[in-house]
Amino acid sequence: MSDKRRGFPLGLDKLAQPTTARAPASAREPLRPQRLLHQAAQDAARSAAPSGLGLDSAHVRARMVDRLRAEGLRGEPIFEAMGRVPRHQFVDTALANQAYEDTSLPIGLGQTISKPSVIARMLGLLLEGANARREGHLGRALEIGTGCGYQAALLACIARHVVSIERLRPLFDKARANLAPWRLDQVRLVYGDGMLGHAPRAPYDSIVAAAGGEDLPPAWLEQLAIGGRLVAPMQSTGGGQVLVVVDRTATGWSRSHHEGVHFVPLKSGVL
């Protein structure tokens, strides 16, 4: 299938909070029959929703970012993006009150949205790549495993262009619905096999994967630009998974292993 048919551009190139009409105060607080009608109406008009307490508050996201900084994580562009993107809008309503805790959450089909600290760590490693250091952003980025779309929204804030691939059709549809209100013209969602990467838009300055296998697929390495960096989980010889960082130079690829992580298995094909 051609790139034109499988990619779905999403509109404007600016992340902006969608507007939602608010019910009038009188509709939020019912009138009390034992009081005079005009007095109740006056009280209702004076009432206001508390600020700074709800999940839509920037203060909630700022507290999450402060905790990540306190853990020693680095990357001001990442923290700025996390302060702008409302994570609770990318998880099920029943889990929204846990959205700003440092925990992974289920998003269906055996998949999860990664912990904020893990996302910040992986994106921070990407920002240390040669091309990213030179340009000040992630350039052309490839995400393997769109999931619910949260990390794609973050990438849109710190990359020039984002291609994100999802192999599970229900999650692809969910991510497209989650991202549509933000109208991100620089994000292209692709329904396909992430192990194959996305050659039509290669090479990529930054590649990040949200699933880990026994080794890195050759397609990812080939689609990495010279000066680009890849960050992905991979099975270690001692069991479990570790973060692997690959840098491509004019003479080849260099690889380094970092801390242990736990991601869903990397699989091929589409469902």
Image (cartoon, rainbow, N blue to C red):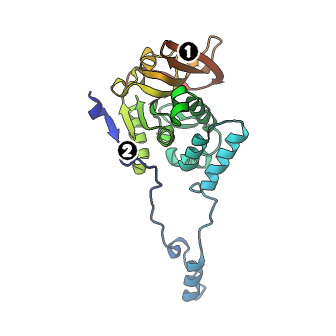
Q: In the rendered structure, which disc, 1 or 2, sits on the residue that comes first in sequence?
A: 2
Where 86 sits versus 129, above or below? below
Q: Mark 1, residues whose alpha carbon is within 10 Å: few (<14), some, or many (≥20)?
A: few
Measured from the top left, where is residue 141 in percent x and y?
Answer: 45, 32
- Comparing 28 with 237, the one in front is 237
Q: Residue at x 65, y 43 (%)?
A: 101
**Disc 1: which residue:** 254
Q: Distance between the residues labelled 1 and 2?
A: 33 Å
Foreground residue among 147 and 13: 13
Q: Residue at x 62, y 38 (%)?
A: 75
Counting the numbered discs, the total is 2
Q: Name the residue under label 2.
A: 185
| Residue located at (63% from left, 14% from top) | 239
Q: Which amino acid does label 1 sit on?
A: Ser
What is the quadrant of residue 173 in the picture? top left
Residue flagged by tag 2: what amino acid is it?
Answer: Asp
Neighbours of disc 2 within 10 Å: few (<14), some (14-19), many (20+)? some
Q: Which residue is drawn at 67% across and 36% down?
A: 73
Residue 64: horizontal and vertical position, in percent?
A: 65, 46
Asked whether disc 1 touches disc 2, contact meaning CB atoms under 8 Å apart, the reply is: no
| Residue 144 position (above or below residue 159) | above
Percent of width and height locating residue 264:
54, 26
**Which mark is on residue 206?**
none
Q: Nearer the viewer, residue 34 or 269?
A: 269
SS for callout 2: loop
